[in-house]
Amino acid sequence: MKKMIVSPIGAFDFTTDKIASDKSISHRCAIFSLLSDKPSQIENFLGAEDTMCTLSIVQSLGAKVEKNGDMITIIPPKEISEPPLILDCGNSGTAIRLLMGFLSTCKGFFVLYGDSYLCSRPMRRVADPLRKIGALIDGRSEGNYAPLGIRGQTLEAFEYESKIASAQVKSALILAALKANGICSFCEPELSRDHSERMLRGMGAQVLSQGLKVTIHPQTAPLKPLDIKVPNDPSSGFFFAVAAAITQGSKVTLSNMLLNKTRIEAYKVLERMGAKVEFIEKNNVYDSVGDIVIMGRELHGVCVEENISWLIDELPALSIAFACASGKSLVKNAQELRVKESDRISSVVKNLQLCGIRVEEFADGYEVEGGILKSATINSFGDHRIAMSFAIAGLISPMHIEDIDCINTSFPNFLELLSQIGSVNAD
Ligand code: S3P
């Protein structure tokens, strides 16, 4: 397993358009291309482990993929083919959950599985509502854990009220609804990221959003193909935003970033903490895209308890900013963090404590008392966002990060970019 040492080199002014492409949108591009009968053109598709797993599953289901420079063309099959092999989702919760919804309506038998981390994440949140409308899904612990076996069926129309704000659950159910026996609706307690609704509407599907409710009409004909340039991922860019925010006198300019409101909340928290943050919209096709500029200033603690699903992926990196701020920061209502790529409440708390920071853990969050980050040996717990968050802490005090291979799941060029603002030794 690879490890690395990251050490500070001082203040910086860093501009990049090389932040990894958006992971959520890339997964959806691959899966949604199967809903059309014409080739989809996708520029800037994320070439990281998670999304390459999805692309290779889409190929196992019969699609052809052609690559031409920065552009991929996905040519959908006439009919989904039943693959002879099991389908490997790697580390990706988005891949497995969206595919559960999609495959539940496809003719054939399919087995979805992933790495040891993914196989210990809960799948009942998707399997249960799908089974209620007739899906045949089984797996370990009564279908809660992968490997999952799915036999495609015609599903009944549904009206489902989800107790959790999860874009993965919502997207799985929207995909199932497109092939169900009537008009369906899905309600969530708080708006989760809405890329599926926007992209499917762009492809001509009747997916109507009204507040927290989505109404889905069954798809009667193939959808229009996708023709999209995937913007850069604000969740990946956020590591560099925190880097600028905690290093006073530093500035980072991130170009070609997705500016969807459900994805930039963490930048707004940094702003509340005292950093200077500017969003500059450049265009708006399926979604708003532009530049984000972040400047480091003195930071103070905050309370984060609302719109948690809008910053769930950024909380580990935000915790590094909390540790560098004056005063206390509190995270509440974030129990979903416990079922991400690792138990992120526990991973953040344990590693911050190793850095000499006072942290108190709760069932649904934690409280961090800002202080002085000390050098430590960090356990990534095989979680890409934990490894990258503590790599950023290395810009304040040297950090040894163990097991960094996981970074490739979402941001293969992270170290290359990090080495432009800090000293990085990986082996
Ligand atoms: C994602 C949704 C989020 C997020 C994940 C990507 C998506 O998960 O944490 O990294 O692409 O739909 P939940 O929707 O389950 O919270």
Image: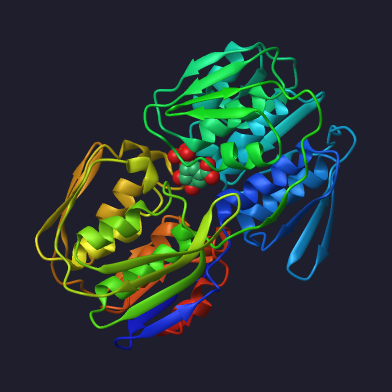
In this orientation, does residue 144 appear?
Answer: no
In the image, farthest residue toward the bottom: 9
Residues 272 and 365: in front is 272
Query: Does residue 57 sit above or below 392 in this rendering?
Result: above
Total marks shown come to 0
Q: How is the image coloured?
A: rainbow
In this orientation, does residue 19 appear?
Answer: yes
Q: Position of residue 348 (x, y in %)?
A: 30, 54
Query: Does residue 223 sit above or below 57 in this rendering?
Result: above
In the image, farthest residue toward the right: 78
Q: Residue at x 62, y 61 (%)?
A: 48
Residues 142 and 11: in front is 11
Residues 112 and 400: in front is 112
Q: Position of residue 170 (x, y in %)?
A: 53, 30
Q: Residue at x 59, y 30 (%)?
A: 172
Quadrant in the rendering for residue 389: bottom left
- Horizontally, residue 144 falls left or right of residue 252, namely right
- Horizontally, residue 99 falls left or right of residue 255, namely right
Q: Position of residue 61 (x, y in %)?
A: 81, 39
Q: Residue at x 64, y 22 (%)?
A: 177
Query: Does residue 332 sit above or below 56 in this rendering?
Result: above
Quadrant in the rendering for residue 84: top right
Q: Position of residue 28 (x, y in %)?
A: 64, 45
